[in-house]
Structure formats: C-alpha cells, structure tokens
C-alpha cells in the first residue's frame, strides 16, 4: 500500500505544524513482509516495521546519502521514529500518533 503525504506532516500538541514544501515527494509504502520503503524530498529510505493491535514502530531504517540543501527529510524520518500508534480515518487517511501524545502525522 503506497500512501502520499498531504499538506502537512505533523501537528504537534503545541500546535506547531510541519508542512512539506513538495507534498508529492514524501511517500511511504508498507509491504506484507513487515518492511517499508519511503521517498523524501532528497533520498529514499527503507526498513522494518512492527504493527499489532493499533501500535506501530519503525526499525532498522536505512537512508541513501545524497545531500540536498533545505531538505525536510530529517523531520520526516524523525516523525516515523516517534510514531507509536496508528489508525485509519473514514476517508482512508493513515494517522500516525506520536509518542507521549506529542502530535500526529497524517498521510492521504
């Protein structure tokens, strides 16, 4: 399943919003063998995920090493690493809830 990001990555509990400069650049794909791949505005990433009973964690992420000025890749990867649980909205959007109720990431 491939899911692209909407206009904002995350809304933190302190109301800070991270908005991608290029919403089509950031995607994530989950496979049945518990691996994921992602694209960012600079590099590609892949790794493993564990998902059970609404909980999710990302592990062993590897990212290609191309340098891009003003990339938001580190924000994106940090949000994946901070993800703790997930749900799907009635519109089919994936919502990742960040640890310690610090915010959410919405994928459309």
Image (cartoon, grey):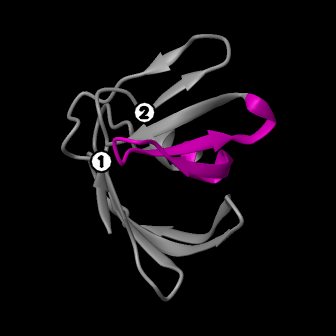
Residue 21 counted in the magenta span = no
Report x, y in % for residue 16: 55, 13
Residue at screen point 37% across, 27% down: 8
- Crowding near the residue tagged with mark 2, few <14, some 14–19, many ≥20 C-alpha atoms within 10 Å: many
- Check the image and name the residue furthest to the right: 100
Span of residues in magenta: 79-101
Q: Nearer the viewer, residue 64 or 102?
A: 102
- Mark yes or no: residue 25 visible: yes
Residue at screen point 33% across, 37% down: 71
Asked if residue 46 lies left or right of residue 50, the reply is: left
In terms of sequence position, does the residue under pointer 1 or pointer 2 come before the other?
Answer: 2
Dot 2: what SS?
A: loop
Report x, y in % for residue 18: 44, 23
The residue wearing badge 2 is 9
Dot 1: what SS?
A: loop
Residue 94 counted in the magenta span = yes
Report x, y in % for residue 34: 54, 81
Report x, y in % for residue 73: 40, 44
Q: Is residue 17 above or below residue 71?
A: above
Q: Is residue 14 above or below residue 83?
A: above
Q: Is residue 60 above or below residue 78?
A: below
């Amino acid at each position: 399943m491939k899911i692209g990001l909407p206009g904002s990555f995350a809304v933190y509990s302190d109301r800070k919003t991270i908005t991608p400069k290029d919403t089509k650049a950031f995607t994530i794909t989950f496979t049945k063998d518990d691996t994921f791949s992602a694209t960012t505005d600079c590099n590609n990433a892949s790794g493993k995920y564990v998902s059970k009973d609404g909980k999710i964690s990302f592990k062993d992420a590897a990212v290609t090493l191309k340098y891009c000025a003003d990339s938001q890749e580190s924000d994106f990867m940090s949000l994946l690493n901070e993800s703790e649980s997930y749900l799907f909205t009635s519109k089919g959007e994936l919502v990742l809830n960040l640890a310690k109720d610090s915010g959410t990431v919405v994928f459309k």
